Image: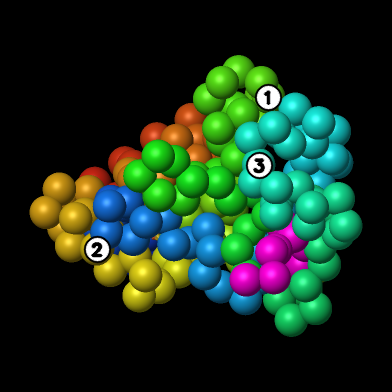
Amino acid sequence: MLIIQDVLIHDDVVQEKFLCQLDACQGACCWEGDWGAPLEAEEIPILVELLDRIRPYLTPEGRAVIEEKGPAVYYEEPGEYGTSLLDNGACSFLTYNALGIAQCGIEQAYNDGAVDFKKPISCHLYPIRIHTNPEVNFEALNYDRWDICSAACSNGAKAKLPLYRFAREALIRKYGEEFYEELDAAAQHLEK
Ligand code: SF4
């Protein structure tokens, strides 16, 4: 376990290897699972505000669900807000590329310059998950193991890419460059 700027980081985040292999998984994390992608409180009004610019990138089914339920729904069991879901359990922001691989509609709008919000930070960091307990000021980063990502594990091992480096851009977006540099230095020290 590492502690960087009061954030606990599980050894797996530093030691495990990971590199998404979309031709194997087809982007299954966008449609598998019981709840929508976790949303931080400040992300909900951002999605509401950007919805008109994101809507053209979504499927008719996704647009209809967002019209009915909104972009965010409260899920009792995890006790948090997440993106709304289609009846088949897929994220309402899910789209597909020409090869049938799942893509995030928010990210497509971002890539086109239509919005300045890339996607929820939970999706950006995945398979790193943030666990918090604000009452005791506790925040931890854990590796969320999921069998749908098994190809990413062998791909990461082949590329010798540690999970935290795979998630570099998202970690910097969430915690800043200095945090990432400290984490990288600690990880390299441990490796010696
Ligand atoms: S996180 Fe897992 S399911 Fe999602 S794109 Fe990467 S390997 Fe595929």
Please tell me which residue lies in front, 50 or 125: 50
Amino acid type, mark 3 = Leu
Report ligand 1 position as a quadrant. Answer: bottom left
Q: Is mark 2 within 8 Å of ligand 1?
A: yes
Q: Which mark is residue 151?
A: 2
Please tell me which residue lies in front, 3 or 27: 27
Residue of label 3: 58
Residue 57 falls in which quadrant of the image?
top right
- Mark 3 and mark 2 in contact? Answer it, CB < 8 Å: no
Location of the N terminus (image quadrant): bottom left
Q: Is residue 176 above or below residue 152?
A: above
- Mark 3 and mark 1 in contact? Answer it, CB < 8 Å: no
Residue 45 image point, x, y percent? 85, 41
- What range of the chain is rendered magenta? 80-88
**One can see residue 5 in this view:** no
Amino acid type, mark 1 = Val
Q: Residues within 10 Å of mark 3 (few under 14, many from 20)?
A: many
Q: Is mark 3 on a helix, strand or loop?
A: loop
From the viewer's perspective, is 115 left or right of 8?
A: right
Q: Calculate the distance from the C-alpha at mark 2 to the C-alpha at mark 1.
A: 31 Å
Please report the residue visible at 84 percent of the width from the left and 40 percent of the height from the top.
48
Please report the residue visible at 53 percent of the width from the left and 58 percent of the height from the top.
30
